[in-house]
Image: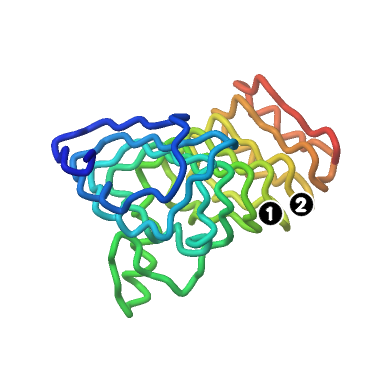
C-alpha cells in the first residue's frame, strides 16, 4: 500500500488510467514534496474531501487536474496546506467559489479578524504557479495581496465577472497572465501595466474595452498579447 511508504517525497500517478475515489490515506505521506494525480478525461477519479492534504506540510508541487472535486467544490481552498506550496494546478476540477465563512486555512481557526486577515495575506506567499483553468469560479479565489512571488496565473475558461482586479504593486514577479474565456468587463486597468515583467497576457473572449492604455508601453518584456473577441 502506497500510504505506508512514509519516507516517499515524490509521487506521480498522472494519466495512470485509475478509476475511483482518491484514498485519504495519502495524507500519511507527510514527507511528500510533489504529488501529481492528474487524470485524463476518459477516467473517473473523484474525492469526497481534501482534509488529508492539510497533513502534507512539505508539499511544494500539487497537480490534481480533471479530478472530480464536486463534493468539495466550495471548501477546496481551505483544505490545502500552503506552507511550502509553490505549484498548484486544479484544472477542470468542477471547482466553485470557496465559501467565505470558512477560516480554517491549514487548520487555523480564530475569531480574531486581525489574525484571519494575516492568515489570508501570508499563507499563500510561496505560490509561484497557479492554474485553475476550466472551472466554475466567478471571482479570483485568492487574496491577491498575498501572491507576492506569483509568476504564472491562469484562470481562463471560468465564469469570472466584473473588472480585472489585481493587487497594485504586489504581483511584481508575474510573467504569465491568462484570464481568457470569462465574463470580465470594463477597461484594462492601468495598474496592470505596473507588472513590468509580464511576458504573456491573454484576455480574449471577454467583454473588455478594446482601447489599449498608453501605459502598456511599460510592459517592455511582453511577447504575447491577445485581446480578440472583446
Question: Residue 68 versus residue 98: which sits nearer the camera?
Answer: 68
Neighbourhood count class around disc 2 (C-alpha, 10 Å): few under 14, some 14–19, many 20 upward? some
Residue with the mark numbered 2: 183
The front one of 77 and 115 is 77
Task: Locate residue 98, reporting x and y percent.
Answer: 52, 63
The x and y percentages for residue 48 are 43, 59
Secondary structure at numbered mark 2: strand
Cα separation, mark 1 vs mark 2, equals 6 Å
Is 1 left, or right, of 224 in this rendering? left
- In the picture, the disc for residue 115 is none
Residue 217 occupies which quadrant of the picture? top right
Q: Position of residue 209 (x, y in %)?
A: 84, 45
Give the percent coordinates (x, y) of residue 221.
Answer: 60, 21
Residue underneath mark 1: 160
- Is the residue under label 2 in contact with that under label 1 (CB below 8 Å)? yes
Q: Residue at x 76, y 34 (%)?
A: 214
Amino acid at each position: 500500500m502506497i500510504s505506508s511508504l512514509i519516507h516517499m517525497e515524490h509521487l506521480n500517478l498522472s494519466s495512470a488510467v485509475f478509476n475511483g475515489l482518491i484514498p485519504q490515506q495519502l495524507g500519511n505521506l507527510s514527507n511528500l514534496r510533489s504529488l501529481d494525480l492528474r487524470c485524463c478525461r476518459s477516467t473517473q477519479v473523484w474525492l469526497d474531501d481534501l482534509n488529508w492534504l492539510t497533513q502534507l506540510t512539505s508539499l511544494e508541487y500539487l497537480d490534481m487536474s480533471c479530478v472530480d472535486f464536486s463534493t468539495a467544490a466550495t471548501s477546496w481552498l481551505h483544505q490545502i496546506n500552503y506552507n511550502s506550496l509553490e505549484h498548484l494546478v486544479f484544472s477542470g476540477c468542477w471547482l466553485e467559489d470557496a465559501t467565505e465563512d470558512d477560516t480554517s486555512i491549514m487548520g487555523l481557526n480564530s475569531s480574531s479578524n486581525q489574525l484571519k486577515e494575516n492568515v489570508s495575506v501570508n499563507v499563500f506567499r510561496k505560490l509561484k504557479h497557479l492554474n485553475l483553468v476550466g472551472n466554475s469560479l466567478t471571482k479570483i479565489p485568492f487574496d491577491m495581496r498575498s501572491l507576492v512571488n506569483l509568476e504564472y496565473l491562469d484562470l481562463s475558461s471560468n465564469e469570472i465577472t466584473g473588472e480585472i482586479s489585481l493587487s497594485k504593486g504586489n504581483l511584481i514577479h508575474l510573467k504569465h497572465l491568462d484570464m481568457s474565456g470569462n465574463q470580465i468587463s470594463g477597461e484594462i486597468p492601468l495598474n496592470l501595466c505596473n507588472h513590468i515583467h509580464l511576458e504573456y497576457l491573454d484576455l480574449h473572449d471577454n467583454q473588455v474595452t478594446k482601447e489599449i492604455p498608453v501605459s502598456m508601453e511599460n510592459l517592455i518584456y511582453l511577447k504575447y498579447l491577445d485581446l480578440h473577441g472583446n
